[in-house]
Amino acid sequence: MADNAKLRFARAFAAGVPHNRALGIEILEFTEDAVLFKLPYDEKLVGHPDTGTLHGGAITALLDGASGAAVFAALTEMVPIATLDLRIDYLRPAEANQAVLARATCYKITKHVAFTRAVAYHDDGSSQETSLRSAIAHSVGTFMVSTRGGPK
Amino acid sequence: MSLVDDLAAAKAAGDYQRFIDTVPYARFLGLTAALVGDELVTSMRFGDHLIGNPALPALHGGTLGALLESAAIFELLWRAETIVLPKTITLTIDYLRSGGAVETHARGIVTRQGKRVANLRMEAWQADRSTPVATAHAIFLVMR
């Protein structure tokens, strides 16, 4: 099906992004409704050497990457996109030695603009709802759809 | 030594880079910091691992966000009389143009310093400071 080919292409594109690869990001789910990214714990991403907590910047990059991928997944045809803005609320520090998951959704897409929400959290083995209650960060973003060589 | 002790020693020696190098993620990004006049400018060396869109090529938006957040935190740590590690409450990034495959600079400006909360705005630029690639604002918890 054309849709599956489009999703496969978008997923491969997201997986091939050099910075996503440098962070060790794995794509666990990739559908038109939501994408799920996994950032494995890695000492090179630590922001607080005393506690082993990941740097907020790594969480920012995870949420930005997952949100962009959610827009790609929601597009009806593959066109370039560009982030307009991203707001991140940091709810609590990530635990040392634990992977961080990010679930992103593109909840509205118009001809020119896409709107996203994303949550970063630890998978503690409980239900997703419970995991989200102990979320690490929450973000909302907007993206320009169909850019040619850059935003706007 | 704890991070706060490291920072106090780095400040006493006027060697900010020594502090940055104790943070693994700052080394991963390739961050450096230097006083330019009385401005603390944080820079991110270009590396292929920072690319988000290989076709342009353009920096990953997350790396610009991390640079902007770091510039704000370094500004707070550098200016503060007593060292408290700021905790980011919220960060909002406006992406103005795609970041090219070159070194990127950033600085943070304190718009309000309170006892519990500090507000900053930040900007990031590449070759031409008058055309920033991204701006941001952030709120930090600065209580012990």
Image (cartoon, grey):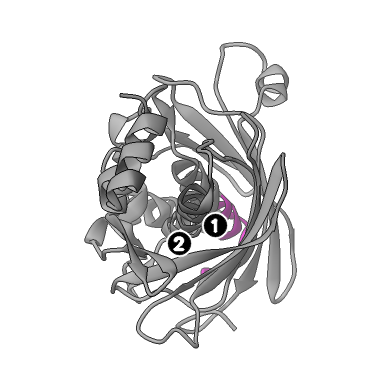
Position of residue B69 measured from the top left corner of the image (x, y, whole percent): 51, 53
Q: Quadrant of residue A149?
A: bottom left
Residue beneath disc 1: A68
Position of residue A30 measured from the top left corner of the image (x, y, whole percent): 52, 43
Q: Which mark is residue A34?
A: none
Position of residue A152 measured from the top left corner of the image (x, y, whole percent): 60, 84
Element class at badge 2: helix
Residue at image coords 40%, 87%: B128
Label 1 crowd bin: few (<14), some (14–19), many (20+), radius 10 Å: many
Residue type of the residue flagged with mark 2: Leu
Highlighted magenta segment, given as a residue range: A67-79
Q: Is residue B53 magenta?
A: no
Residue beneath disc 2: B64
Task: In the displayed orientation, state which residue is furthest to the top.
Answer: A126
As rendered, which of B115 and B102 lies closer to the eye? B115
Residue type of the residue flagged with mark 1: Gly
